[in-house]
Amino acid sequence: MPSGPLLAFDTGSPVVSVALALPDRVDTLATPQGRSSRELIAMIDELLAGAGLEARDLEGVGAARGPGSFTGLRVGLATAIGLHQASGVRAGAVSTFDVLASHYAERAAAPSPAILAVVDAHRDRWFIQRVRLGTDGAAQADGPHEIGSRADLECSALPVVGHGVSALKAPAGAVEATELAPTMLRRMRNGEFSWDLATLAEPLYLRPPATSAPKLVRSKHAPRKAANDYEGRRAPNER
């Protein structure tokens, strides 16, 4: 298991967080989601400078791979790849569902052995993953992910964990998520993390982005068809 400095960041959640694990402490910075693409590198630089470290001094870099914000996930995973390529530090990514489940185990007063890790997909839809917790708090997915509604969560017999669940009429024992980067660090320290570069190229989006293909618009400078190119044109011998 890693014993040197570790860096983790979650850029897909509403609360974007960066955390640095040192031998005697964990330093954390956080910012709202909309500013992560502009501030992530500055946050990383601030944490490393405060500890007197450079990227090459790290033993590992970890990122959350989603689900979450499309732009946020791309920024985070690309940053992890860049740190690996620039300094040679090993890097990998882990599902946000897994991190949320570990977050629940750390904060619940009496953890349930089965929970729902959820991510707000907006428009009254939620990404849902049923997770089973071991006696040591280790999380394991229990079936495929689903997409459900607010009503599905409010009628659930299982506790839920996620950002924004405090606004739901959720079952007792629900845990509102905060910064997830420190939880990622603990997973990295405990060996509950995949140091596989391929995970950095596989964000967990769960649905296509809410965009559509551009329509073909004819330019006013495009050449017009010749008159005899159109159907119904007059035959040469027609009078």
Image: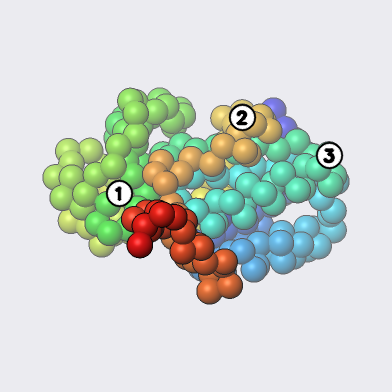
Is the residue under label 2 in contact with that under label 1 (CB below 8 Å)?
no
Q: Which mark is residue 126?
A: 1
Closer to us: 185 or 83: 83
Mark 3: few, some, or many residues within 10 Å (few <14, many ≥20)?
A: some
Q: Amino acid at mark 1?
A: Trp
Q: Is residue 121 visible?
A: yes
Question: Which residue is at 84% across, 47% downward?
Answer: 86
Is the residue under label 1 in contact with that under label 3 (CB below 8 Å)?
no
Q: Which residue is mark 2?
A: 194
Q: Amino acid at mark 3?
A: Gly
Left or right placement of residue 236 versus residue 61 in this view = left
Left or right placement of residue 67 versus residue 123 in this view = right
Q: Which mark is residue 164?
A: none
Q: Which residue is mark 3?
A: 88
Quote the CA–CA distance across marks 3 and 2: 17 Å
* Quadrant in the picture for residue 18: bottom right
Name the spot of residue 85 as percent of width and height, x first: 81, 42
* Quadrant in the picture for residue 235: bottom left
Q: Is residue 102 visible?
A: no
Closer to us: 58 or 63: 63
